[in-house]
């Protein structure tokens, strides 16, 4: 079980759950009087919940160094579970601790209900964990998305900052707490440090992002365009299979993630991305003009580091536009690894990379394009028994389809530790 995830992920959990709250808990417990001992455990619950919410805000800054260690999907998973855990512990704090002040009770109550609303909303509109597994919730989300656009969802998610500020005020109003000098210095220091990091990432860091321009666009079909960006003077832009968060001037003020399609080249100054129309901003990008200024945050991704860990054969399964980062991997490692690409599309109009795959001529390279989803009985004919047992499988596509493919591969005998995926839900 422990081998399923990188050691770095367990270290992140250790820091988030224990080490990060520890100084706050230690300083508070050492400073409290004997009269507070009966309720100290409920006070500690509130401190732990606040520390977890702060750590959640830190993870929302998407530290690139942490992404390289555990991957952005794992980072988002930790973020989500910390939010749920903080909400539950805050419930215990709120319902068992005796509070005498009306303002204290009000700030705590409003913060808790805002956090509850945020968790429910994020579960429906900003996380694929429930939606990808429960068709009923997926249908509810589809009907409500007309009102709750992506940009609105981001602003609702930022209610976490309001929760933080309300709890900060809540603590400062509590007499038996606010006279604990060491604790309050740490408490305010934690708050300023984390909120400062968040504000820096959202408002200052974008002005220092790598800036480029749209060099060319190529219409691939009615809903898909290949955009080539140039970043003059830049080197070592990305590794194979990476993705960035892009902000296109005049189109969207919010950053959107897109995977790199082209080969990783240390001297290259260009990035190619595949944009498929699925929402308001991606529809606008279908007509993006040459010369449009673009800012990028990143790169993110762990595909290259995973591939380079061993020399296993590669089986790359792309579902629709999910082929984009896998094509980057195939182009980069062509001639050095045994590579098999399986690409499933809706119909012939979606075979926009057929020529690119055909151009990757090498004795160790093969590919299949299919106009339908994979079926379990096809695996034994498409993939040799040796590869099923030994290859590294990378799967990219819509989350529900990726989960289905993972299940099929596991039933076909592929070891769990040989499966890596990227689900297009962010």
Image (spheres, rainbow, N blue to C red):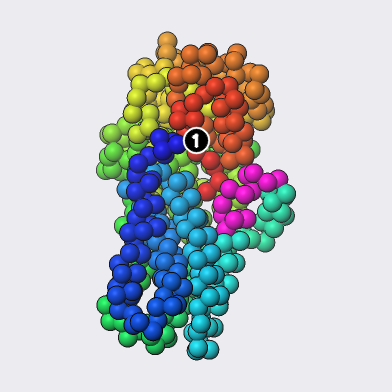
* Left or right position of 139 against 123: right
Residue at image coords 66%, 18%: 377
Q: Position of residue 229 (x, y in %)?
A: 41, 42
Please tell me in which quadrant of the rendered image residue 351 appears: top right
Any part of residue 67 in sight? no
Tell me if residue 125 is in the magenta stretch.
yes
In the image, 265 versus 48, the foreground residue is 48
Q: Is residue 182 above or below residue 366?
A: below
Give the residue pinned by disc 1.
421
* Left or right position of 198 against 419: left
Please tell me in which quadrant of the rendered image residue 348 appears: top right
Residue at image coords 27%, 34%: 267
Residue at image coords 49%, 30%: 416
In the image, 153 versus 162, the foreground residue is 162
In the rendered image, the quadrant that contains the N terminus is top left
Q: Which residues are magenta?
A: 121-135
Magenta stretch, main secondary structure, is helix
Residue at image coords 45%, 81%: 170
Identify the element where label 1 is drawn: strand
Please tell me in which quadrant of the rendered image residue 28 appears: bottom left
Residue projecting furthest to the top: 363
Q: Mark 1: give few (<14), some (14-19) or many (20+) Cα within 10 Å.
A: many
Q: Position of residue 71 (x, y in %)?
A: 41, 43
State how many labels appear: 1
Tell me if residue 116 is in the magenta stretch.
no
Q: Is residue 27 above or below residue 217?
A: below
* Left or right position of 96 against 131: left
In the image, 33 versus 247, the foreground residue is 33
Q: Position of residue 365 (x, y in %)?
A: 45, 16
Any part of residue 124 in sight? yes
Q: Position of residue 317 (x, y in %)?
A: 53, 27
In the image, 87 versus 384, the foreground residue is 87
């Amino acid at each position: 079980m422990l081998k399923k995830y990188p050691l770095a992920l367990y270290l992140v959990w250790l820091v988030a759950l224990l080490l990060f709250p520890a100084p706050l808990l230690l300083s508070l417990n050492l400073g409290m009087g004997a009269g507070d001992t009966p309720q100290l455990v409920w006070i500690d619950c509130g401190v732990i919940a606040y520390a977890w919410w702060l750590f959640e805000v830190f993870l929302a800054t998407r530290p690139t160094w942490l992404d390289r260690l555990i991957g952005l999907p794992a980072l988002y998973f930790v973020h989500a579970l910390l939010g749920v855990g903080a909400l539950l512990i805050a419930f215990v704090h709120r319902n068992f601790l005796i509070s005498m002040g009306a303002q204290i009770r009000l700030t705590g109550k409003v913060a808790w209900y805002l956090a509850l609303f945020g968790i429910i909303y994020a579960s429906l509109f900003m996380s694929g964990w429930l939606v990808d597994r429960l068709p009923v919730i997926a249908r509810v989300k589809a009907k409500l998305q007309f009102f709750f656009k992506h940009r609105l969802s981001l602003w609702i998610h930022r209610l976490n900052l309001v929760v933080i500020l309300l709890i900060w005020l809540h603590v400062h109003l509590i007499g038996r707490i606010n006279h604990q000098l060491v604790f309050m210095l740490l408490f305010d220091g934690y708050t300023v440090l984390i909120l400062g990091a968040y504000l820096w990432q959202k408002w200052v860091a974008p002005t220092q992002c790598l800036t480029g321009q749209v060099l060319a666009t190529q219409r691939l079909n009615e809903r898909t365009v290949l955009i080539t960006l140039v970043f003059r003077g830049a080197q070592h832009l990305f590794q194979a299979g990476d993705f960035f968060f892009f902000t296109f001037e005049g189109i969207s003020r919010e950053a959107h993630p897109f995977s790199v399609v082209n080969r990783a080249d240390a001297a290259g100054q260009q990035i190619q991305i595949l944009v498929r129309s699925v929402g308001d901003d991606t529809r606008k990008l279908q007509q993006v003009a040459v010369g449009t200024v673009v800012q990028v945050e990143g790169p993110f991704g762990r595909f290259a580091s995973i591939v380079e860990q061993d020399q296993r054969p590669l089986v790359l399964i792309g579902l629709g536009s999910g082929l984009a980062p896998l094509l980057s991997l195939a182009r980069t490692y062509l001639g050095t690894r045994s590579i098999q690409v399986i690409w499933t599309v809706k119909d012939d109009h979606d075979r926009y990379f057929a020529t690119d795959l055909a151009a990757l001529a090498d004795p160790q390279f093969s590919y299949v394009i299919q106009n339908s989803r994979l079926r379990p009985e096809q695996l034994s004919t498409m993939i040799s028994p040796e590869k099923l047992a030994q290859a590294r499988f990378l799967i990219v596509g819509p989350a529900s389809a990726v989960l289905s493919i993972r299940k099929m591969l596991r039933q076909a005998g592929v070891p769990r530790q040989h499966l890596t995926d990227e689900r297009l839900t962010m």
